Image (cartoon, helix red, strand yellow):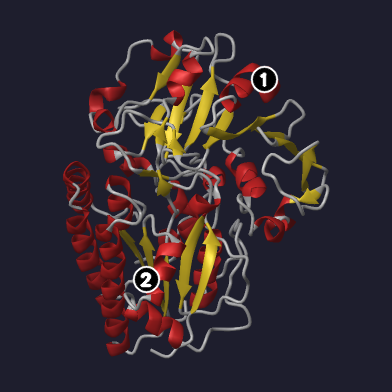
Amino acid sequence: MNGRRCVILVADGARPDVLERLLVLGKLPNLSSILALGGSYNRAVTVFPSTSGPAYLPMITGKHPGDCNIPGIRWFERSNGQGMPIQGKLRSYVGLGSRFLRSDLSAHTQTLFEISPGSVAIASALAGNYNTKTLSRYELLFMFAHLTGHYYILDKLASYDIVNAVESAAPVVFGILHAIDGYSHKHSPEASVTHDSYVALDRLLGIIVDRLRRKRQEYMLIVTSDHGLTATTRHLDLAEILSSFGCTVYAFPSVLGEWNPKAFEYDNLLSSVDCICAVSGNSMANIYFRNGISWEGITYCENLQQVIAGLLANPGVDIVAGRSLSGGIRVFSRRGQSSMEFDGTNVIYSAIERDPFGYKNMPIGIPIDLAFPFTYDTDYPDAPLQLFHLLQSARAGDLVASATEGFDFRTNEFPLHHSSHGSLCRAHMLVPLVSTSSIRSKYVRTVDIFPTILEYMGIPSDKLELQGRSFLGDGIAPFRS
């Protein structure tokens, strides 16, 4: 530790195009000042699923959600592994279930809050120093905001706590603001009240910079998002579609149902269904199938061809992926198929006849970790690597489905969402990334934030299993606050 400090603000659901437009219009003067004084701006790629909770993990662990064994905001525990007492094998991080996000992390995953003691998380249950009283306060406010639409109250409390944490000696402050996402869901990403939340974020940014300047503190400030989002024009009931194939399906209840601790107390549930549909964000889903009389063990995509074809016959289902009997991964869309296979050294991505993502300039048989530049400017940035990492989780579905832009997979949300996220599409996967440090490369992921923080603060990372890389470049940018 070298005495430096980091502040990471996560503007849940902030879209890069909206932020850029407001910058040009002069609505974000503090953000503009950071850029004028030597800061950097990029459109970074988030993780899949592109949804809150899982998409926070790369910033505080340096890993993709699948490698943290968190494949979505809803998932099913196939094995006899851990599960919370109320929900057993069925996990949802909506409402009270969010408390279990940190304890559900894979055993070998370390968070920023363990590596940098004294660091704090605001409006998130991811830090171990979050006491029950503080957590309950946010849970109640989030429920109130969700039911009434008054998300600004939630962000006011978070902003107050973030400023107090900046005033303290916390080496890292990780703060989440939820209003942009909330108003985007309730109204639209372009609603005036949504834009007002970007302006409120900018005001908070000005206060933070002023407080750090007064303390003569050497610091790095990062402003980003966990996902983008798009307007929802059509809601599909994915469970109903699966039922039409002859499956007996269990789907997670409505949001209000998930906030009820008794929602998952179903006798003999697992013996009465043969398919479980777990939707995240609402444009992504993990789908699980009973393998004979047991839920343990994977059902491979070769044994699910009729289901895959049936899903893709619906225009709202864009991408379906699953594990193969060969040990690799298969990806399907109406455009084509592809595979990801381990050749002993690299995971190789290859289109089968036509590419399912429509990639036109992708080299044949390219390692997925080298494919990023070839996919960044496409409709599916970084999709092969993202799918590969997700399907490393033992908790990931037998099939993973990604929705077509404009569609989502749930009809029973309350209140009904007018925008969605979670999918592999470009508008969900790209997020703004502002930093007072130097970002030299165009090709940046949110998983790069964690190693950047460690390098900036002088924390050794050689013994950590990091999947990102620091974007500090040749040194610290000449930011002059």
Q: Which quadrant holds residue 279?
A: top left
**Count of all numbered marks drawn on residues in the image:** 2
Horizontal and vertical percent position of residue 6: 41, 74
Which structural element holds mark 1? helix
97 is higher (above) or lower (below) than 130? above
- Say which label, 1 or 2, has the lower sequence index: 2
390 is higher (above) or lower (below) than 433? above
Residue 194 vs residue 104, the one in the foreground: 194
Q: Residues within 10 Å of mark 1 (few under 14, many from 20)?
A: few
**Which residue sits at x=30%, y=27%?**
86
Q: Residues within 10 Å of mark 2 (few under 14, many from 20)?
A: some
Say which mark, if any, is on residue 323.
Answer: none
Say which quadrant the C terminus sits in.
bottom left
Q: Amino acid at mark 1?
A: Gln
Mark 1 lies on residue:
305
Q: Which quadrant holds residue 223?
A: bottom left
Horizontal and vertical percent position of residue 98: 33, 42
**Which residue sits at x=77%, y=38%?**
354
Mark 2 lies on residue:
22
Residue 441 lies left or right of residue 98; in this view the side is: right
Q: CA distance from mark 1 to mark 2?
A: 46 Å
Q: Amino acid at mark 2?
A: Leu
**Which residue sits at x=44%, y=88%?**
37
**Which residue sits at x=26%, y=68%?**
200
Which structural element holds mark 2? helix
Q: Answer yes or no: is residue 3 visible.
A: no
Residue 169 vs residue 391, the one in the foreground: 391
258 is higher (above) or lower (below) than 93? above
